[in-house]
Image (spheres, rainbow, N blue to C red):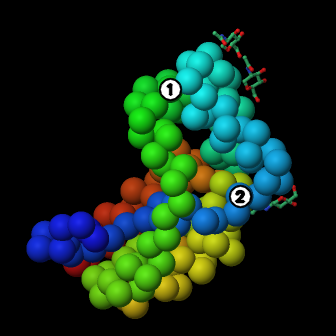
Amino acid sequence: MKNYPDIKIDGFISIAGFVNANFKPNITIEEFGKITMTLIDDNFSTVVYGINGTINFRTFKPMSDEFRAFKIGEAALIAPEYRKSNFKSIDLADFFSTLSIPTLNIIGEKDALVPLEYNLYFANLAKNGEKIIYKNIGHSPPWEDTKSTTSDIARFASNI
Ligand SMILES: *[C@@H]1O[C@H](CO)[C@@H](O)[C@H](O)[C@H]1NC(C)=O
Ligand SMILES: *[C@@H]1O[C@H](CO)[C@@H](O)[C@H](O)[C@H]1NC(C)=O
Ligand SMILES: *[C@@H]1O[C@H](CO)[C@@H](O)[C@H](O)[C@H]1NC(C)=O
C-alpha cells in the first residue's frame, strides 16, 4: 500500500497485527533474542529447532498436532533471505495513521507474540478503524476461532 499508492484499496484487515517490528512480545527479551537468533542461522537444523521453539507462542489454545506440523512446515519453507530481512526494524505507525479506508483489527486477547496493549495501540491509530478482541485467543485467530474470524471478515467485507 505504501509503495504503490495508485492501487485502489477499499479496506484493510489486520489479524493479530504485526505491522511494526518494534513491538515487545510477552516473553523476556533474552528468551525472545535466543529464539530469533536461531531463525537467522545459516544452519538449517538450527533454524528448524528454533522454529519449533517459537511454535508455542502461536496460539493460546493448545494446538492440534496437525496445526503444529503445518506451522512448522510453513515457517521452514520461508526463504532464508526473507527471514533475515524480517528482522530489520520497521515502523509503519505514521503510514497507518494516514489511512482513511475502513480497517478491521482482529485481536487475540492472549496473544503472546504481539501483546494486547501493542495491538490496541496500533488499532487505535486508524482513522476509520474497527477492532474486535477475541477472548482467550492467542496469535492465531483463524485457527483458534475459525467461525468468528470468518464471519467478522465476511461482515466487514460486505460493508465496504
Ligand atoms: C547444525 O545444527 C545442528 C543442530 O543444532 C548441529 O547438530 C550441527 O552440528 C550443526 N552443523 C554445523 C555444520 O554446524
Ligand atoms: C519441539 O517443541 C515441543 C514443544 O515445545 C517440544 O516438546 C519438543 O521437544 C521440541 N522438539 C525438538 C526436537 O526440540
Ligand atoms: C504475559 O505473561 C504473563 C506471565 O507469564 C501472563 O500472566 C500474562 O497472562 C501474559 N499476557 C498475555 C497477553 O499473554
**Residue at the image position 65 percent from the left and 21 percent from the top:** 46
Vertical arrangement, residue 156 with respect to residue 153, above or below: below
Q: Are marks 1 and 2 in contact (CB under 8 Å)?
A: no
**Residue at the image position 44 percent from the left and 82 percent from the top:** 94
| Residue 17: percent from left, percent from top | 51, 64
Q: How many marks?
A: 2
Q: Is residue 56 visible?
A: no
Vertical arrangement, residue 12 with respect to residue 49, above or below: below
Which element is circle 2 on? Answer: loop
Mark number, residue 76: 1
Mark number, residue 138: none
Q: Nearer the viewer, residue 148 or 100?
A: 100
**What's under tag 1, amino acid-wise?**
Ala
Question: Is 2 positioned to the left or the right of 121 in the image?
Answer: left
Which element is circle 1 on? Answer: helix
Residue at the spot of label 2: 25
Ligand 2 quadrant?
Answer: top right
| Residue 1: percent from left, percent from top | 26, 68
Vertical arrangement, residue 50 with respect to residue 89, above or below: above
| Residue 79: percent from left, percent from top | 40, 31
**What's under tag 2, amino acid-wise?**
Pro
Question: Is 152 positioned to the left or the right of 29 in the image?
Answer: left
Question: Is 101 positioned to the left or the right of 151 in the image?
Answer: left
Mark 1 and mark 2: span between their CA atoms? 21 Å
Q: Residues within 10 Å of mark 2 (few under 14, many from 20)?
A: some
Q: Is residue 98 visible?
A: yes
